[in-house]
């Protein structure tokens, strides 16, 4: 006995109580044969399913490692000393041993009536009253069905059906982590119905992460439907108005379940629950094992058994002990978290403002560069166009000069003694030309005679081209290239009466009205300058009475 560990001694004491005494060596041998599993030892004693080795033949089995609470620090400083905790462990609810066949037969009518009453109350949606014999169940197995994967939301709906109450957060969508409304259970309820805490839906680990991340106190409720106090705890504590209000007003995260289900069973193992109903409160607290004081999720208190989980005791514990003890630190964490969030938002806004300003500056720079590139492109295009125009103008001028020189050689007729038309010409420069033409000479010859005056003096006549720059009839070429406007660049007009002598192909001078009677005086006007004759030219060409004179023709 001295070599046994404390958990082994506890298991031996519980087996002694369940079996009604017995020899400690035999009980120790039974526990060692089943690996110190109390439930299997009970099966061995009551069912005789396995042989019990003699005390002398047994070998000391390795002591199982003591169960350790994962991810938690336990703070039971405000709940009494070690003796008080050991006393609470003594209230552990053991699994009922399987009764004999005789007791099963006697209990069948009672269980049948209890099931009928339970069915009727459930159909009528009436809270099931706490009747001692209704909780008797001689058919429950020794090992609870912890392997089933029923969800917490199913347990919440069953809890509402059983208590006739509803969760405060039932109007919130389940997508937010809170159980949603059920039309088949809430449609007939009025506003004065009892309320349950705002149980959230999710697995145990998610709830712990939420408590740690959001700096909120978590309330973990674990029940066992096989326990005799289960119905009374649900009907009295979980629906108590004061208890529900404390949890709601203090923004608790409430989670619960039946330990027969896999997730609540895992939570009971981590929280070291030994008796049901079980209520634990967890929250962030300064770490005792770290000098940095970083927050660590800590078990603040555990309450086991119906006597320790009454609404009065829980409310007094929360308002008088737990909340005053943990809220200042949690508030500091919240303030620090809000400050960090505020600073993060400020940095984000500043970064966004800087990014917007940089984008605006970059946009202005891009717009300026684009405008400069567009202006440079336009200037380049205009310069290229000017060069093309200048080249085209030079080409036309060169071609036009070639035609002038060719016309001087080939088109200007030589003056003959028989010529009858005496024509005087006043050039734009003010100089005068006078010669006689044959009436059969065409306007092309007269225009070519005037056009040769625009040939530079250094272009000697002997170097004039022998052939036209273009093949074909001369008049056709001149007519095809615009005649007197585009080709010649000037026109002739009589002085008085005013009459234009426009070039036309194959037109004889003798057929021109102002020239057929022996000739006349003509003025050479550049194209587009007929309306801009200077007053000096007009004075020089007119007498005092307004008529032109030929006194200087000789």
Image (spheres, helix red, strand yellow):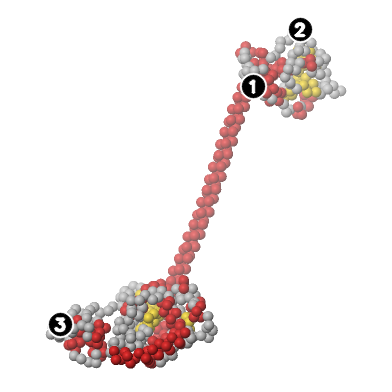
What secondary structure is marked by label 2?
loop
What secondary structure is marked by label 3?
loop
Viewer can see residue 136: no
Foreground tag (3 vs 2): 3
* Residue under the image location 62 percent in, 11 percent down: 462
* Residue under the image location 74 percent in, 16 percent down: 442
- Relative depth, front residue between 195 and 209: 195
Q: Earlier in the sequence, mark 3 or mark 2?
A: 3
- Relative depth, front residue between 204 and 143: 143
Q: Which residue is mark 3?
A: 58
- Relative depth, front residue between 155 and 493: 155
Tell me the quarter of the image containing the N terminus.
bottom left
What secondary structure is marked by label 1?
helix
Q: Earlier in the sequence, mark 1 or mark 2?
A: 1
Tell me the quarter of the image containing the C terminus.
top right
Marks 1 & 2, CB-CB < 8 Å contact: no
Q: How many marks?
A: 3
Depicted 281 relative to depicted 358: above or below: below
Q: Which residue is mark 2?
A: 417
Looking at the image, residue 8 sits to the left or right of residue 411; the answer is: left
Number of other residues with Cα within 10 Å of mark 1, as a class: few under 14, some 14 to 19, many 20 or more: some
Q: Earlier in the sequence, mark 3 or mark 1?
A: 3
Foreground tag (3 vs 1): 3
- Relative depth, front residue between 408 and 353: 408
Marks 3 & 1, CB-CB < 8 Å contact: no
Q: Which residue is mark 1?
A: 400
* Residue under the image location 76 percent in, 29 percent down: 531
Looking at the image, residue 23 sits to the left or right of residue 139; the answer is: left
- Quadrant of residue 14 within the rendered picture: bottom left
* Residue under the image location 76 percent in, 27 percent down: 530
- The location of residue 436, given as percent across then percent down, is 76, 12
């Amino acid at each position: 006995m001295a070599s046994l560990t404390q958990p082994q001694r506890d298991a031996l004491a519980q087996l002694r109580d369940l079996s009604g005494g017995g020899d400690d060596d035999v009980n120790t041998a039974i526990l060692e044969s089943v690996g110190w599993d109390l439930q299997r030892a009970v099966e061995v004693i009551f069912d005789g399913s396995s042989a019990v080795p003699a005390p002398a033949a047994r070998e000391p089995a390795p002591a199982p490692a003591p169960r350790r609470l994962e991810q938690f620090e336990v703070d039971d400083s405000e709940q009494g000393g070690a003796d008080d905790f050991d006393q609470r462990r003594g209230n552990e609810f053991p699994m009922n041993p399987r009764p004999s066949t005789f007791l099963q037969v006697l209990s069948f009518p009672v269980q049948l009536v209890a099931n009928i009453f339970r069915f009727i109350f459930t159909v009528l949606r009436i809270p099931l009253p706490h009747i001692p014999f209704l909780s008797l169940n001689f058919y429950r197995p020794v090992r609870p069905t912890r392997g089933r994967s029923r969800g917490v939301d199913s347990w919440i709906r069953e809890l509402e059906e059983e208590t006739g109450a509803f969760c405060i957060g039932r109007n919130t969508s389940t997508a937010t982590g809170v159980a949603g409304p059920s039309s088949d259970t809430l449609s007939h309820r009025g506003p004065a119905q009892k309320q349950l805490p705002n149980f959230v839906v999710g697995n145990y680990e998610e709830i712990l992460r939420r408590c740690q991340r959001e700096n909120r106190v978590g309330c973990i409720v674990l029940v066992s439907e096989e326990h005799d106090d289960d119905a009374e705890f649900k009907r009295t504590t979980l629906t108590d108005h004061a208890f529900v209000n404390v949890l709601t007003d203090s923004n608790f995260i409430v989670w619960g379940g039946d330990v027969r289900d896999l997730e609540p069973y895992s939570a009971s193992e981590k929280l070291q629950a030994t008796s049901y109903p079980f209520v634990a409160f967890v929250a962030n607290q300064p770490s005792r094992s770290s000098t940095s004081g970083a927050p660590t999720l800590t078990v603040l208190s555990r309450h086991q058994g119906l006597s320790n989980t009454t609404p009065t005791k829980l409310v007094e514990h929360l308002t008088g002990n737990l909340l005053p003890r943990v809220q200042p630190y949690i508030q500091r964490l919240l303030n620090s978290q809000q400050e960090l969030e505020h600073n993060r938002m400020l940095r984000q806004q500043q970064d966004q403002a800087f990014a917007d300003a940089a984008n605006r500056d970059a946009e202005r720079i891009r717009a300026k560069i684009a405008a400069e590139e567009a202006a440079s492109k336009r200037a380049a295009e205009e310069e290229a166009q000017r060069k093309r125009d200048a080249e085209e103008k030079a080409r036309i001028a060169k071609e036009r000069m070639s035609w002038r020189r060719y016309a001087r050689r080939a088109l200007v007729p030589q003056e003959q003694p028989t010529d009858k038309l005496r024509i005087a010409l006043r050039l734009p420069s003010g100089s005068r030309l006078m010669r006689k033409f044959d009436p059969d000479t065409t306007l092309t010859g007269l225009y070519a005679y005037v056009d040769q005056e625009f040939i530079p003096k250094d272009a000697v006549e002997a170097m004039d081209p022998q052939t036209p720059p273009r093949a074909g009839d001369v008049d056709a070429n001149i007519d095809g290239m615009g005649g007197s406007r585009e080709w010649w660049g000037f026109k002739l007009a009589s002085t008085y009466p005013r009459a234009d002598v426009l070039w036309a192909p194959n037109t004889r001078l003798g057929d021109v009205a102002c020239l057929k009677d022996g000739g006349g005086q003509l003025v050479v006007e550049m194209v587009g300058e007929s309306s801009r004759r200077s007053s000096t030219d007009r004075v020089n060409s007119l007498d005092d009475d307004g008529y032109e004179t030929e006194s200087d023709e000789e």
